[in-house]
Image (cartoon, helix red, strand yellow):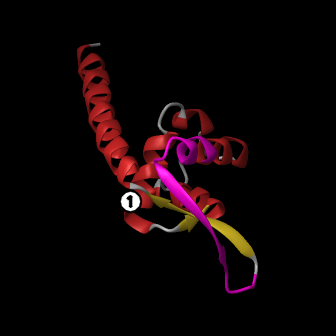
Amino acid sequence: MAQADALQGSLNLLVLKLLARRAPLHGYAIMAAIQEMSAEVLRVEQGSLYPALHRMEEDGWISAEWVTRDNCKKVRAYSLTRAGRKQLEQAEERWSAVTAAVNRVLRMA
């Protein structure tokens, strides 16, 4: 069962990491990759992803360009910028610290 609430606070991190590995990607490909890579546990909705992509683009973490797919349809493809790589590194450090802290609490409870 996909859990949209499991993405709370981690969407930027997931998108940045995915773009670091597979860019350029368009929005639907990002949604599908997160769902597939999480073994169907995480699902990103368009209403969450596209505003996040726009914010990350405004912050300079990602860049976007129009590309034409095989079916002649134009889509915006997103790539990580240098600032995005720095943000990704910081976000991964924060995520590691938070998950380590949660695991300590779970082991003590």
Work out whether residue 27 or residue 63 is closer to the camera in this orientation and state it.
Answer: 63
Q: Which quarter of the picture shows residue 27?
A: bottom right
The residue at the point 69 percent across, 69 percent down is: 75
Residue wearing tag 1: 20
Image quadrant in which the C terminus is located = top left
Side of 57 where 89 appears, left or right: left
Measuring from the top left, give residue 78's x and y in whole percent: 55, 61
Q: Is residue 10 magenta?
A: no
The residue at the point 68 percent across, 86 percent down is: 70
Measuring from the top left, give residue 51's x and y in whole percent: 66, 42
Q: Secondary structure at mark 1?
A: helix
Magenta residues (range)? 54-72
Three-letter code, disc 1:
Ala
Determine whether 83 is above or below 27 in the image: above
Work out whether residue 67 or residue 5 is closer to the camera in this orientation and state it.
Answer: 67
Q: Is residue 70 magenta?
A: yes
Measuring from the top left, give residue 48's x and y in whole percent: 66, 41
